[in-house]
Amino acid sequence: MHIYGSPLSPFVARVILACEYKGLKYTISMPEGGLKTPEYLALNPFGKIPTVKDGSTVIYESNVIVHYLDEKYPKKKKVIPASASAAGKAQVIARVCDLYVQEPALDLFRQIVGRAPKNKAAADKAKADMEKGLDILNGYISPGPCATGKSFTVADCYAIPALLFATSAGPQFGLKDPLKGRPNVKKYLAAIKKHPAAKAHMVETQKIMKDRLGN
Ligand SMILES: N[C@@H](CCC(=O)N[C@@H](CS)C(=O)NCC(=O)O)C(=O)O
């Protein structure tokens, strides 16, 4: 299986983390020549990462890929829990991380790296949205070892990149410790760093972020 993308992309990270937990072998690289070449657009017409090529199957959109991996490799450990209620709980956490933590964190990140114009009003809104998302996440997430408790799930695939971006981008906008007053989220992030499926990815991503953002 080949993943087109970079581990710094929070969308790609979801797929990497699912593969790591499931024990799937993969290679990873950015598409040759960039995201908008005719060759890459033939694989993913949006010209975004991640895209996965698994034998003759080409698939894109991170949430679709994560579900595909569980269905394609049912004998490997699953990231979507078997029971409807456990799956629902994991997917709520994933969704909260996606829409209400990662999205505003990415808005801040885009201003930091110059992909969006510096705009205080937009940054203040993103910061307030992210804080609300973190407050709500704090009410759902387990303090560890994983986001829903004992087992690694799709919730962790989403929570890890969302929280790495929130804790890296927040301080640049005066939010010294974005997890302050959110004890469950704080304990979770400390605990999941030690998980075998997450450890290597988190160390690598945090190093790249530190080089780029200075924290
Ligand atoms: N909904 C997509 C979003 C993917 C996405 O936005 N990826 C970014 C990298 S973080 C990208 O490829 N951006 C390049 C572009 O939009 O041209 C998913 O979940 O896979």
Image (cartoon, helix red, strand yellow):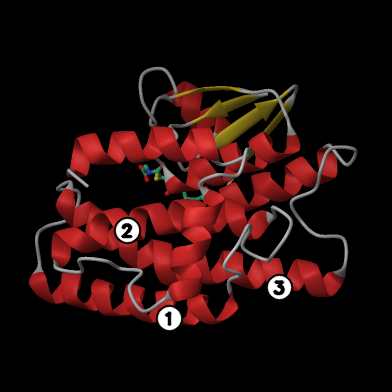
- On screen, residue 17 versus residue 122, left or right, reads right
Q: Is residue 52 left or right of residue 131?
A: right
Quadrant of the rendered structure where residue 72 is? top right
Residue 199 percent across, percent down from the top left: 53, 38
Circle nearer the viewer, 2 or 3: 2
Q: Residue at x 38, y 31 (%)?
A: 36
On screen, residue 214 versus residue 18, left or right, reads left
- Locate residue 65, reporting x and y percent: 66, 44
Residue 22, picture quadrant: top right
- The mark that comes first in sequence, 1 or 3, is 3
What residue would you read off at disc 1? 135
Position above or below: 196 against 185:
above
Q: Nearer the viewer, residue 115 or 199?
A: 199
Q: Residue at x 24, y 63 (%)?
A: 170
For label 2, the SS is helix
Question: Considering only order in the chain, which callout, 3 or 2, is on the residue closer to the N terminus?
Answer: 3
Residue at (79% x, 45% y) in the render: 70
- The reply, left or right, for residue 85 in relation to residue 209 is right
Characterize the local packing of mark 2: few (<14), some (14-19) or many (20 or more) Cα atoms within 10 angstroms.
Answer: some
Task: Give the label on residue 89, or none.
Answer: 3
Q: Secondary structure at mark 3?
A: helix
Residue position marked by numbered label 2 in the rendering: 167
Q: Amino acid at mark 3?
A: Lys
